[in-house]
Amino acid sequence: MTILTTLGTGSYEPTNYVWGERAYQTSLFVTAVAAWFPGATVKAVSTELAWERQGGALLAAIPNVERVPFFVSGRMIPWRGE
């Protein structure tokens, strides 16, 4: 299974997410989904600014998250360091 997510530049607050009998508190919904499906691959699409703001929290929760290049009008938005 692949979980595809996006990151924005907003301020994310911790929230309790519940699915059936499962509950998970996090500021990023995808971390709850990844906890519920531990064998899944997680891919994140994000602008550089959003990655700077939220990428650290996402990497802390899901160290093997894969960043996906983001294209605008056929041009790739480069990730910092690439």
Image (cartoon, rainbow, N blue to C red):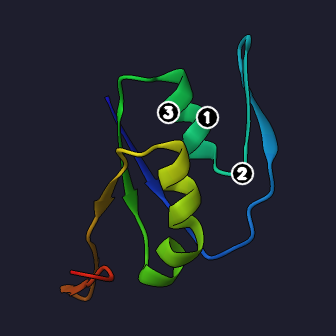
Say if mark 1 contacts mark 3, CB within 8 Å: yes
Return the residue at label 2: 27
User: Residue 19: image x %, image y %?
Assistant: 69, 21
Q: Position of residue 66 (x, y in %)?
A: 31, 53
Between 80 and 34, the one nearer to me in the picture: 80
Find residue 34 and name its label. Answer: 3
Q: Secondary structure at mark 2?
A: loop
Measured in 3D between alpha carbons, the distance from the residue under mark 3 to the one under mark 2, in whole angstroms, is 13 Å
What is the secondary structure assignment of the residue under circle 1? Answer: helix
Q: Position of residue 6 (x, y in %)?
A: 48, 60
Apparent side of residue 73 relative to residue 45 in the rendered image (left or right): left
In the image shown, does 33 or 80 lie closer to the viewer? Answer: 80
Task: Categorize mark 1 by other alpha carbons within 10 Å: few (<14), some (14-19), many (20+).
Answer: many
Q: Residue at x 53, y 62 (%)?
A: 56
Q: Is residue 4 above or below residue 21?
A: below
Q: Amino acid at mark 2?
A: Ser
Amino acid type, callout 1: Ala
Q: Name the residue that disc number 1 marks.
A: 32
Could you say which quadrant of the image residue 26 lies in? Answer: top right
Residue 56 left/right relative to 24: left
In which quadrant of the rendered view does residue 39 lie?
A: top left
Q: Are marks 3 and 2 in contact (CB under 8 Å)?
A: no
Q: Is residue 11 left or right of residue 51?
A: right
Please name the residue shown 50% across and 33% down the image: 34
